[in-house]
Image (tube, rainbow, N blue to C red):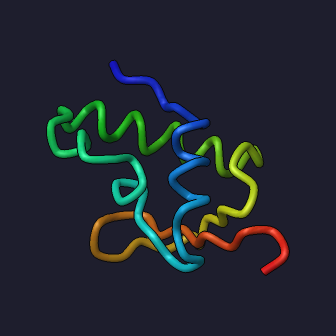
Amino acid sequence: MTQLDLDKLKATLAARNPGPFHFHEIYGRDWDALYIGDKVKLGHSFLNAVRAGKLPGVIDTGTKKGGGRLYLWKPCGI
């Protein structure tokens, strides 16, 4: 099973404009090659990391739309 790379995700987020996103958009190009079970586990790990404050500036909107749970990227100071 692929592990969540918080440092890589933080770097990807830092290069993004603020706004809403789905987890798969910041995971990277390997997302489509993952098994559905791995996608579910990674998505859950990401949600837990967001809720634990491990990704400052990422907000769980509590809604699902289109490609799953919607998050908001709002870097500190914006």
Q: Nearer the viewer, residue 18 or 36?
A: 18
Q: Which percent across, then down, holds residue 76? A: 81, 68
Q: Which percent across, then down, holds residue 15? A: 54, 62
- Considering every residue shown, the one lying at the far front of the view is 15
Residue name at image x 45 percent, y 70 percent: 21
Q: In this view, does 54 lie above or below 17?
A: above
Residue name at image x 43 percent, y 45 percent: 43
Quarter of the image where one finds residue 41: top left
Quarter of the image where one finds residue 14: bottom right
Q: Which percent across, then down, holds residue 10? A: 61, 48
In what quadrant of the picture does the N terminus appear? top left
Report whether 74 appears left or right of 71.
Answer: right
Report whether 18 appears left or right of 29.
Answer: right
In what quadrant of the picture does the C terminus appear? bottom right
Residue name at image x 35 percent, y 64 percent: 68
Q: Which percent across, then down, holds residue 38? A: 29, 31
